[in-house]
Image (spheres, grey):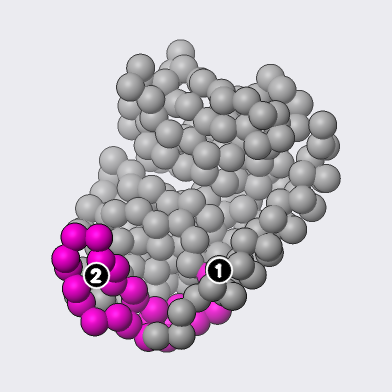
């Protein structure tokens, strides 16, 4: 079973491998002609995203798609007409990963290397909230039924909860070095998450 330091090293290697694969497979075309027939693709590759390694994506309350830029250290916004806006994250080299819409009309995201949970308002204003556990490696994030955002801590081996005022509570995962990764709200009102190293599916209740 991996210890946190080993897990972090493995995670870095995994991310680099995934990014390298995506770069190698990227098509050189700047923008495919619109074709909205069933099963067809539209590809947007604005120059602003060059080398930024766009990673997480989620729909925002403004009708646009919001994107994390793993290597670009920013949050991107793409409108339905293809217009792109980018917003730099204050913490250098933060490595933003997952992103999700919050109940407050903002987008919330994880900063794996920055060890923060970030919030970006629709006007592009970014606020960062440090995770109490040092080097926790926050990864997945999702809205819970309690109106808070729930996130996984890969290195910290915990599930975190952040309220709209920035208060963070952490809950240790029973399996040591489990490497919690993705997280989602279940139909039973609990948050469900994956354990990469633990080879388990976890469930955490609101009480």
Q: Please, which residue is most extreme toward the top here?
A: 207
Q: Which residue is mark 2?
A: 79
Q: Give the x, y percent position of residue 142.
A: 42, 39
- Nearer to the camera, 87 or 180: 180
How crowded pointer 2 is (Cα within 10 Å; few <14, some 14-19, many 20+) is rated as: few
Q: Which residue is drawn at the image coordinates 16% and 65% (left, top)?
A: 37
| Residue located at (57% from left, 54% from top) | 111
Q: Are marks 2 and 1 in contact (CB under 8 Å)?
A: no
Decide: is 119 above or below 153.
below
Looking at the rendered structure, the secondary structure element under dot 1 is: helix
Question: Which residue is at the front of the view, 157 or 28?
Answer: 28
Quadrant location of the N terminus? Answer: top right
Which disc is residue 134 wearing?
none
* Label 2, label 1: how far apart the Cα atoms are: 23 Å
Drawn side of residue 87 relative to residue 14, left or right: left
Q: Nearer the viewer, mark 2 or mark 1?
A: 1
Q: Which residue is mark 1?
A: 22
Q: Position of residue 116 (x, y in %)?
A: 57, 51
User: What is the crowding at mark 1: few (fewer than 14 residues within 10 Å), some, or many (at least 20)?
Assistant: few
Q: Magenta span: helix, strand or loop, mainly?
A: loop
Q: Assign a secondary structure to mark 2.
A: loop
Residue range corresponding to the magenta coloring: 30-53
């Amino acid at each position: 079973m991996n210890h946190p330091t080993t897990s972090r090293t493995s995670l870095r290697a995994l991310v680099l491998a995934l990014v390298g694969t995506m770069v190698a497979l990227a098509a050189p075309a700047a923008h495919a002609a619109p074709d909205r027939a069933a099963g067809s693709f539209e590809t947007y590759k604005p120059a602003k995203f060059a080398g930024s390694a766009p990673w997480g994506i989620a729909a925002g309350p403004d009708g646009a798609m919001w994107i994390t830029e793993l290597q670009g250290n920013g949050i991107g916004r793409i409108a339905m007409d293809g217009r792109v806006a980018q917003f730099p994250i204050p913490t250098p080299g933060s490595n933003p990963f997952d992103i999700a819409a919050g109940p407050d009309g903002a987008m919330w995201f994880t900063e794996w290397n920055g060890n923060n949970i970030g919030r970006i308002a629709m006007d592009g204003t970014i606020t960062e909230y440090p995770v109490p556990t040092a080097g926790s490696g926050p990864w997945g994030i999702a809205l819970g039924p309690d109106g808070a955002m729930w996130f996984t801590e890969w290195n910290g081996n915990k599930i975190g909860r952040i309220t709209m005022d920035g208060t963070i509570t952490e809950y240790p995962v029973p399996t040591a070095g489990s490497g919690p990764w993705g997280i989602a709200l279940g139909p039973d009102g609990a948050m469900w998450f994956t354990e990469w190293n633990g080879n388990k599916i976890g469930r955490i209740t609101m009480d």
